[in-house]
Structures are given as structure tokens and as C-alpha cells.
Amino acid sequence: MKTILTGLRVNSDLHIGHYLGVLTHMAKLSNKYSTDGYEVNFFIPDLHSIISEVEGDMAANTLRNVKYYLAAGLQPNEHVHFYRQSRVPAHSELCWILNCIATMGELSRMTQFKEKGKGKTTVNVGIFDYPVLMAADILLYDAYYVPVGEDQFQHLELTRDLATRFNHRFGKDILTVPAQTKEQVQFMEISNGVRIRDLLNPEKKMSKSTPAENSKIMLSDTPELARKKIMSATTDSFAKVRYDMFNQPGISNLLQIEALATNTPLDDVIAKWNGETRYGELKKKVAESVAVMLDNFQKKLANITDEEVNSLFERGEVYANQVANRKLEEVQEAFGLR
Ligand code: AMP
């Protein structure tokens, strides 16, 4: 049985780009694979979070993060496992053991480490060691598919290297080497991964760090406010709807949002609106679709209780400890620690 593993970062302000690009996508994949012979692990990488100062209340943000996925349509079942990394001590233990086979040279080459350390006089060891903990997160569960963004591809390669080196050293396949990046991307349909654009400046992706309020629609915005933001989105002067991200990114972004918000194939949306000369009509329709989407999401979110999430963690952490401890023991035996 293959395992899919993904970390749910504790993020505060999420926008509809996260919702349409990541939350609903992961919810769909989880619903599909967990009923098709796969184990699907969702873990909260809280030990990763503390490499820099944590903003806000981590416990509350953790609960809210899981609620976001549930409200985005993720249906838990006995093959879907939610757990907090810090509640499964085997992550830290395997990290230490892998530290003893990883090299300073390879960790120093990690782009993320170099970028995070840029211009700083001191950098904590956690930032340096982050990829090894990530390798432990993956290898403890024999996870084969690990959907990660491009920024994590290098860390995934390191995980594959460490697993291969470990197996080679002990002459048996104790650790499962995760799939290559290309296979990951295909399986998790990451190539279909959409980028929702900034509403005011559609050449860029929608980002929480852009200060202009009208450039992004937050998941906490009222449907009414979301409607106004869509109506004031930047378009162009072609006066003809066409799906052309290069020349008409604003209009194309609206078509993309419409398709995802209404769960309609993009081609159908394009066919419907192609050649329309009144941009206002398209905007009205998209504004309505986004308002309905947010309203549904927010209503679902309000109905998910802390108890519900806590009981998912309770069940998930029992499962995760069992699986992870079994693997850790095998690793310890190989090293002669047991
Ligand atoms: P960030 O908020 O930039 O840390 O991104 C967290 C995750 O959300 C990453 O997997 C991004 O690829 C995804 N993401 C961020 N912004 C967008 C966007 N505008 N459209 C689609 N996905 C996004």
C-alpha cells in the first residue's frame, strides 16, 4: 500500500489563490486516493515552524489550518491521517540518526538555507538542518508520493539521496526512496497547478505579501467585499474576452477563477465567454461565483468544531506513532542501537 504524505504549514492569512490552487486540489486528491488503496498522511510540521519566530497562537492556527482543509471538501476516513509532528517523537530521533549520514557539504548547498541565511550574522542550526528533519518526516512512513512545491524539490532530492545511502550502507532496502520529482509532479497533477493572479496587477501571482487590499481576496473577506474586489479587477483595452495569459492576463485570470470557483472545466468557461465584448458582464458573473464560493466555505468552516479536529489528531497520532516507531526500530537495529 503506497503512502502519500503532505505537510500543512501553519499559515495565517490565506487567500483564494491558496484555496483554489492548493486546498481544494489536495482535498480532491485525498478523497480520490484514500478510497483507492492509499494511505494519506497530513501532518502539521510544527517543529519546522519553530526555526523562525512563530507569529500568533500556534495551537489555534493548527486547528484552523485543518479546518480549512475540511471546509475545502476534504473527507476524512480511516485512510486519512492528521497528526502533529511534535507529537510523534520518532521524527526528531530519525532526524538525529540521518544527521549522522548527511554531510555538511550537501546541506550547505541547499538553496533555501543559503537564501534564509543571506545577510544574517547568525543562523540557527534548525534552519541548516531543516531538510534532514524533512527527510525523516517522509522516510518514517515509507511515503512514496510527497507533493511539494518547486521550492522543496531540492530537499526531496536530498531525501532520496539519504535513503539510498542508508540502504546501501546496510545492504538492504530499509528506507523507501520516494518517487522522483517528475513522477511526483505527474501523480499529484502539480503540472495542472494553477496560479491565481493579483487582481490589480495580473502579471504577478496573488500574494499575501502584496499590501494593496484590492489585489487579493482573503478567505476571511465577506462575500460582499469579494464581489467589490472582482468588480474593480484590472482588465485591458482589447474589449474582447480571450483566454490569453500573456496578452490578457487580467481577463484570463477571471476566466480561471470562474472555472475553479464553479468547478467547471476551463475550456467550457472559455467557450462560453469567448468574444464577449462587455467585460462588466463577465466580472458580474465571476463576482457572483466567488461570493457564493466564499459563503459556502465560510459556512462550512463555522460548523467545524475544535473537538472534531482534536479527535482527528487523537486517532491520527496513534496511527502515526505506530507506523513511525516501527520504522525507527528497524533503523536503530541496522545501526546496532537495538
Ligand atoms: P505561500 O503563501 O507563498 O507560502 O504559498 C503556499 C502554497 O500556496 C504554495 O504551495 C503555493 O504554490 C500556493 N500558492 C500561493 N499563492 C498562490 C496563488 N496565487 N495561486 C495558486 N497557488 C498559490
Image (spheres, rainbow, N blue to C red):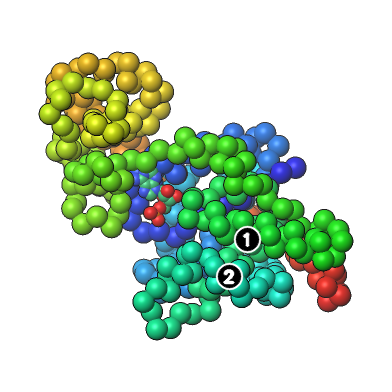
- Tag 2 residue: 107
In the rendered image, the quadrant that contains the C terminus is bottom right
Q: Horizontally, is 250 left or right of 178 in the view?
A: left
Instruction: Name the one closer to the observer, 82 or 329.
Output: 329
- Tag 1 residue: 158
Question: Which percent across, then down, holds residue 20?
Answer: 39, 39
Looking at the picture, does residue 250 appear above or below residue 278?
Answer: below
Q: Is mark 2 within 8 Å of ligand 1?
A: no
Can the viewer see residue 276?
A: yes
Give how far apart the Cα atoms at labels 2 and 1 are: 9 Å
Q: Is mark 1 within 8 Å of ligand 1?
A: no
Please tell me which residue is depicted at 23% across the width and 31% down the height of the picture.
248
Instruction: Name the one closer to the observer, 29 or 153.
Output: 153
In the rendered image, the quadrant that contains the N terminus is top right
Amino acid type, mark 1: Leu
Q: Element at badge 1?
A: helix
Instruction: Name the one closer to the observer, 119 or 295.
Output: 119
Q: Element at badge 2?
A: helix
Please tell me which residue is depicted at 49% across the width and 37% down the height of the picture.
191
Q: Horizontally, is 111 left or right of 262 in the view?
A: right
